[in-house]
Image (cartoon, rainbow, N blue to C red):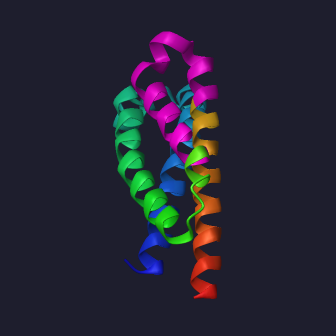
Amino acid sequence: MTIRTRNLLDQTAISLSLLCAIHCFAVPIALALLPSLAVVPLVDEHFHVLLAVLVVPTSFIALFLGCRMHQRWRVLGWGVPGVLILVFTALFGHDLLGEIGERAFTVFGAGLVTLGHLLNFKLCRETECSN
């Protein structure tokens, strides 16, 4: 797999996890301002689950491929817990954590995923440059 493909996977995972966090904050604000948005599928809790389903494989593939290349496995210590938090929050957050807790955990998880991918991206570029 080329460095370009690995970078694209990292960038996609970062974008998806940030979209998850933005969705968490933007939907309640949008609903308050435009109640007719309640019928849009993006407002549905299933959208959060869909984002998690997209983040999981993208993140794991990008992180594991990057770690194989740069051999700094600590990157997984940032990305994997973030992915697990996003999945947990998407599946159980609304019922177990409430609306505010769900948002807080989503933002925290998305932040960990983003940090893991940024670190992975940086290390992959450094490794590629030194080869």
Residue drawn 65% across the image and 78% down it:
126
Q: Which stretch appears magenta?
A: 78-105
Report the quarter where the C terminus lies: bottom right
Q: Quadrant of residue 106?
A: top right
- Image-based side of 116 in relation to 62, left or right: right
Q: In the rendered view, does 50 fall on the left or right side of 9?
A: left
Numbered-mark total:
0
**Displayed quadrant of residue 109:** top right
Q: Residue at x 59, y 67 (%)?
A: 121
Query: The N terminus lies in which quarter of the figure?
Result: bottom left
Residue 39 is left or right of residue 28, and the answer is: left
Residue 34 location (% of width, % of height): 52, 31
41 above or below 121?
Answer: above
Residue depicted at 37% across the width and 36% down the height: 47
Q: Position of residue 115 (x, y in %)?
A: 65, 52
**Residue 89 in magenta stretch:** yes
- Is 9 located above or below residue 75 in the figure? below
Q: Position of residue 78 (x, y in %)?
A: 61, 46
- Please tell me whether residue 3 belongs to the stretch shown in magenta: no
Q: Is residue 1 above or below residue 66?
A: below
In this rendered view, identify the residue nearer to me: 27 or 65: 65
Which residue occupies 60% across, 54% down?
A: 75
Residue 85, given in percent of the width and then of the height, sits at 52, 31
| Relative side of 42 to 98, left or right | left
Q: Name the chief secondary structure element in magenta.
A: helix
In-front residue for pair 61/101: 61
* Vertical position of residue 20 compared to residue 72: above or below: above
Instruction: Report the residue that reaches farthest toward the front.
Output: 71
| Residue in front for this viewpoint, 72 or 25 | 72
